[in-house]
Image: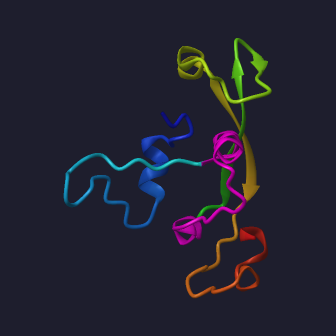
Amino acid sequence: MNLSEPTETIKTALPGWPGRGIPTGRRRRCGWLGLVVVKYSTSINYCNFLNLTKLDALDTFETIKVAVTYKFDGIELEHYPADLDMLARAEVVYHELPGWQKPTTGANTVYGLPKQAR
């Protein structure tokens, strides 16, 4: 379950968004970065690095959202909810970051990226 999947409007803003997988025909799933899920996943999997791919898909966005917490019944949750029913009814709280609106293709180090993309 990915509560941070964007609406159809956002999906159509992605350049070249095919919407469906070529081999299977299944609907592609795309969403804003869910930092709550990343934090939870790294804590249970002992991960010490993260590799973001397809960063260039965000090159044209004026703002980029990241999910920073969940609200349940108006209360911000301190941790990723273990209860799936609670998770299904939770509201995602986003933080908006400025986009970089410059190409990231060809960057081979973090310093080759626009400042906002770092």
54 vs 38, nearest the viewer: 38
Residue 51 in which image quadrant: bottom right
Q: Residue at x 27, y 56 (%)?
A: 21
Q: Residue at x 63, y 85 (%)?
A: 107
Is residue 1 rendered to the left or right of residue 83? left
Can residue 113 be seen from the camera position used here? yes
Residue 102 in which image quadrant: bottom right
Can residue 60 be seen from the camera position used here? no
Query: Residue 52 placed where, x, y %?
Result: 60, 64
Picture layout, residue 39 above or below residue 62: above
Q: Residue at x 46, y 50 (%)?
A: 30
Is residue 77 rendered to the left or right of residue 22? right
Query: Residue 11 placed where, x, y %?
Result: 44, 51
Query: Residue 5 placed where, x, y %?
Result: 50, 41
Picture layout, residue 93 above or below residue 13: above
Q: Is residue 19 magenta?
A: no
Q: Which residues are magenta?
A: 33-59
